[in-house]
Image: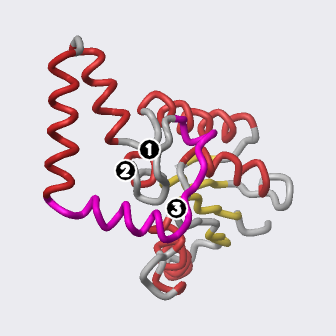
Amino acid sequence: PDAPVVVAFGASPTFGYGVEAADAWPARLARGLSAEGKAARVVNVGQIGYSSWQGLRLWDRIAHEAPFQVAIVSYVVNDVEVLRFFQPDGRDERHSVAPGAVAAALVNGLKSLAPFEALRRGVVRSLSRRANPARARQLLSLVSTRVLAADYEANLREFVYRGRRDDIRIV
């Protein structure tokens, strides 16, 4: 029988940002499986900056091109860290517009400065004192994440649903 195809979905760490392609974890997984005598073809579809929602769109594009039997889903940082790549404009990620490279670099640079972070936390504390506890958590979530926790959970559940539907094992 043909070796199973394993597709690695994820963001920068899956893509191998900052390392040679041969050192990205999907390539290392392929070598490890081979060393153990396990036949598998590992395909790295990691994309820098992608969130779980974008990963689902990627699934839509590739699922019909080439069949695969296993999907490894590794999305975290781009879902939970606001301003990592995109400037929030009050809309959720599905409807937001990516800033230019200069604007993103400026925002990311400011964000790394301690006074900027202290100001952000102060604004959150001030707003949360005026709101009920549930609203305070929601406000903190909005300024702390790129994707709301409920949407992130829904996206991950959708990966599981698609795997079950298409008889693909999700890891």
Within 10 angstroms of label 2, few (less than 14), some, or many (20 or more) residues? some
Q: Position of residue 8 (x, y in %)?
A: 58, 62
- The local secondary structure at tag 3 comes to loop
- The local secondary structure at tag 2 comes to loop
Query: Which residue is disc 2 drawn over?
Result: 81
> Marks 1/3: CA distance?
11 Å
> Marks 2/1: CA distance?
6 Å
Which amino acid type is marked by label 1?
Arg
Query: Which residue is disc 1 drawn over?
Result: 146
Question: Foreground residue, 82 or 74?
Answer: 82
Which amino acid type is marked by label 2?
Glu
Q: Name which of mark 1 and mark 3 comes first in the sequence.
A: 3
Q: Residue at x 46, y 84 (%)?
A: 23
What label does residue 122 carry, if any?
Answer: none
Q: Are marks 2 and 1 in contact (CB under 8 Å)?
A: yes
- The local secondary structure at tag 1 comes to loop
Whether the magenta-drawn stretch holds residue 98 is answered as: yes
Which image quarter: residue 84? bottom left
Q: Residue at x 38, y 46 (%)?
A: 80
Question: Foreground residue, 51 or 35?
Answer: 51
Whether the magenta-drawn stretch holds residue 149 is answered as: no
Dominant secondary structure, magenta: helix
Q: Residue at x 14, y 56 (%)?
A: 115
Q: Name which of mark 2 and mark 3 comes first in the sequence.
A: 3
Within 10 angstroms of label 1, few (less than 14), some, or many (20 or more) residues? many
Q: Position of residue 83 (x, y in %)?
A: 40, 53
Please give the range of residues in magenta. Answer: 91-114
